[in-house]
Amino acid sequence: MNQQFDAIVMSDQDQMELLPRHHADFRRKEYWDEFFTKRQEKAFEWYGEYSTLRPALHKIVKPRDRVLVVGCGNSDLSPDWANDGYLHVTSMDFSALVIDEMKHKHPSMKWDVMDMTQMSYADASFDCVMDKGALDALMATDDTPVLADAVKMFREIDRVLAPGGSYICVTMAQDFILEHLLTAFTDLLPTYKISAQEVPRSKASPFVPFFVVCTKASSDKRAMVQYNGKVYLDESGLLRKQWLQHEIEATQWYIMSQNELKKIQVGRQRVIELMTSSTSAAINTTPRYTIRLVDVQLRGPNGACGVFLVPQGREHEFLFATEEGAMELASGAGFSRFLIVSLGRAHSFASLEAVQLELNPKMLELSPDSLAKGEKIPYMTVQEGLGERHVVAHGTTDLSGDYFVEEVDMHRRLVFLSNNNTIQSEIKLLPPLTAKQLKDKAKKNKKKNKVSSTARLRFDPTFLAFEYHKSMVSILHYSLALTSASDHKSLLIGLGGGCLASYIQATMPNVTLTACELDPSVVGLAKDFFGFQTNNKLGVIVQDGVVCLRNAAPGSFDSILVDVDAKSKEEKAVGLAAPPLDFISDATLASVHAALSENGMFLVNVACRSSEKYKSIVASLRRLFGSNECVVELKASEQDVNRIVCAVKGPIDLVTWRKAQVPSAPGFTDDEVADLIGLMDIAE
């Protein structure tokens, strides 16, 4: 690792908005239990003093506006506001004792005893209704009577607000309170535009209040919500509410994490995604930075905290994308805490220095409390510069979600954001033909018209980027060589970018391959960006893979290959990344067995971190393929979670396979196929 910079140095330019993405592990109950315990000690000072709220209030409320402070209590907010030049501040609370106290302290101001769910003020009599913790106090629980009172309060606020007026709610945004507040002003009272931002907090506070502003607006403006300056537009009130909830909950999780992460916890890893406030749709859906926090040791020999910048295009590698690799990298760095930072797709980065300057505040926030005053946090990387990544295309498919097609070092890749650190498909680009070569090619084909520039793009179909694809191909290649099959019919479930299908078509002339892909848009991506072409030896059908297998005619295929990722929460919960559970159900495996010809072969990529689940998959294959048949496995690398499980409709003699003299396959080194076959073993 080469150190690129010495230290984090703060400056006024460090304030570009980087927002945490909401995290699924946000422990809401523990957060709020702690808040309500500590709130008794410090009352409501965590909601912010007037001096803290003043900058935001001055942007919304004019000095001559009519202001109503609901649930004022004995807070100094109202008198401080009045002393700041605001001439028409009315304050109310249901406690006569509190109001008497405030009248005595500030006799020149207007103080009323009143219930905020049933106010006696005239309609449209205020330009601003200010609520600092009043809603939170009212909604101490989410019981039905309490929710009904909150609705009454919102209706009363709507009634007393003049057109263009604002309800300003300073709230800790507990989940059910936020849900009820946003539902009221997007559904129950739909003529409101909503914005929110964090209230600046003291370093001593482990909680963050939010400044939620609901403004009576015309119909053309209410479709907009804002958070910390970031804008979301949608006609659907439900979608606007969900977006704002997501942003606020992300901030809550991040603040909670900061406090939790102050102490080193050896062995802990945490992934934090930082979004940008840009209004670009593509940028708004992809993290600008992804930070993997690794706690290695209590006292690192090189310091309390270090930062590693992953070069663009290398974030999928073992050291950066897996917990095991990250711990290996962090352990070698010699820090107590190591922050591994990946740079996001669809974002631009000027230089290493600019990235450091932008990250400095967040790195300081994520540093442990063992970082001494004046101690430096060094930045490191493994190569000069940030690395290069060229985004060729990005978009969204209905079935697979957001995707990117990118080029890194003459390799084109397909990446789905649902699995951001995994390359779905990768093909090698060949140098473009020269003008003379293109001209000669046109003459040879007797084409006189000009060849388009896109025709210069060439792909290497014999390149296989993934070890498990090489394993799958090696088994198929060996099987074909040993049987001398002249017409081998194969079915591939899961096309992706078409790289595996293109390899088989280009290198195995005796194979007629049918590829099955669920997502028609993915077939389009394969054709448009990865050189995938159909012909009389390679066809593609768009269909659910399980349906395809169950509809296959008996004995119709000599080999069936399954290369499909698992995506459901249930599958992830059992440590299964491939294939989906439906593909290894008894019903589907029975269909596979029936669809295979005599001595047919079933090859499936299994990526599973649970040994118990893997054993159950193997047991299912053994049970359904019968006692006379064999189930073997091939795992090319200990670092790779993928392994190919092969079930043969008939016995397989591994000793014979390992001794057989079979020439290497295109794209492999001389002994690579034989070496891979040598790794085959009985699946356990």
Image: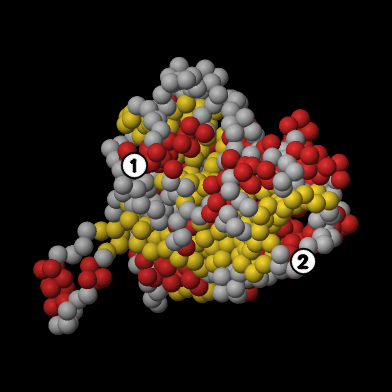
Quarter-wise, where is residue 647 in the image? Answer: bottom right
Residue occupying image coordinates x 22% and y 75%: 452
Q: Which amino acid does label 2 sit on?
A: Ala
Q: Give residue 532's position: percent from left, percent from top.
A: 38, 68
Residue occupying image coordinates x 48% and y 32%: 364
Q: Give residue 201's position: percent from left, percent from top.
A: 60, 38
Judge whether 367 appears above or below 480 on screen.
above
N-terminal of the pair, mark 1 or mark 2, is 2
Please give the label number shown on residue 583.
none
For the residue pair 104 and 429, the one nearer the viewer reads as 104
For the residue pair 417 and 659, the one nearer the viewer reads as 417
Q: Which amino acid does label 1 sit on?
A: Ala
Q: In which quarter of the image is the C terminus?
A: top right
Give the residue number, with chain letter if any, for mark 1.
354
Looking at the rendered image, the disc whose residue lies closer to the viewer, 1 or 2, is: 2
Q: Would residue 567 be seen by someone viewing this image from the given angle?
A: no
Give the residue number, with chain letter if any, for mark 2.
122
Judge whether 25 appears above or below 369 on screen.
below
Residue occupying image coordinates x 50% and y 62%: 402
Exactly how many numbered labels are in the figure? 2
Q: Give residue 133's position: percent from left, percent from top.
A: 73, 46
Helix, strand or loop at label 2? It is loop
- Residue placed furthest toward the left: 436
Neighbourhood count class around disc 1 (C-alpha, 10 Å): few under 14, some 14–19, many 20 upward: few
